[in-house]
Image (cartoon, rainbow, N blue to C red):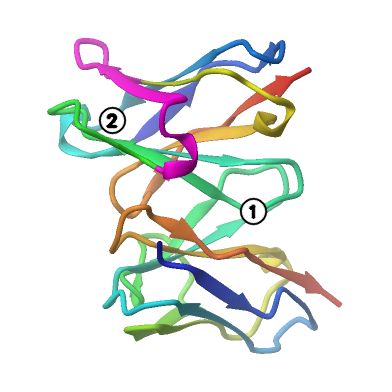
Amino acid sequence: EVVLTQSPDFQSVTPKEKVTITCRASQSIGSTLHWYQQKPNQSPRLLIKYASQSFSGVPSRFSGSGSGTDFTLTINSLEVEDAATYYCHQSSNLPRTFGQGTKVEIK
Amino acid sequence: QVQLVQSGAEVKNPGASVKVSCKASGYTFTNYEINWVRQATGQGLEWMGWMSPSTGNTGYAQKFEGRVTMTRDTSISVAYMELSRLTSEDTAVYYCTRGLMATDWGQGTLVTVS
């Protein structure tokens, strides 16, 4: 099983600041890594597919990078509405797995 | 537009089974796999398994093998997830998602085991 480890678990950030979340896979998964945003009492929403491809309708301040075992989600110029928990997810191997999540709070 | 509409909340006794449905619309149901993901209150996302609506093929996380069954009715574009031998640890919101990348999610179904 591919274990995805996100860091940090929690981040408190002021608006307009840059946020970086990392996701490390226990084995190489190529680029089959996707990022989701989940706000309280909502279903998760796809932000980035295949490590770096922005999904339709997602603001351009969200970007992704990486391949193999190390991946990064970047939020440039954080907005108040970005307060949420972010998850990475791999679809390379079965069972598919999620990272434990990173909660981003607005200061 | 693509929609995944799930069945309503359920309350079950320990040892019982629950069957959650996921009605798909806005796309060709058989063209995209359906995955099921659950989330206990205040916890992260947990992948349970996948199903191919076109073939009926399934794959389950080892944790749920023997307890979960994923099926579909292509005539009405509905996917089902049945979980048996419920315990309090199964209390969670259950989501269906569309495709390998989970581009679309259902609204979630709260299953309470008590």
The kind of residue on which mark 2 rests is: Gly
Front label number (1 vs 2) = 1
* x and y, in percent, of residue A77 in the image: 63, 85
- Checking the image for residue B26, the label placed there is 2
Q: Please, which residue is most extreme toward the left here?
A: B55
Q: Is residue B84 magenta?
A: no
* Disc on the earlier residue, 1 or 2: 2
Chain letter of the residue beneath label 1 in the structure image = B
Is residue B71 in the magenta section? Answer: yes
Q: Residue at 78% of width from left, 82% of height from top?
A: A13
x%, y% of residue A105? 79, 71
In the rendered structure, the answer to whether residue A28 lies left or right of residue B63 reads left
Q: Nearer the viewer, residue A4 or A89?
A: A4
In the rendered image, the vertical position of residue A22 relative to residue B98, given as above or below? below
Q: Is residue B8 left or right of residue A52?
A: right
Q: Is residue B110 left or right of residue B37?
A: right
Residue at x 76% of width, y 48% of height: B42
Q: Amino acid at mark 1?
A: Gly
The residue identified by callout 1 is B44
**Label ID, residue A95:** none
* Of A20 and B27, the residue lying toward us: A20
The residue positioned 39% from the left and 83% from the top of the image is A69
Residue range in magenta is B61-79
Residue drawn at (49%, 22%), measured in percent from left and top? B6
Query: Helix, strand or loop at disc 1?
Result: loop
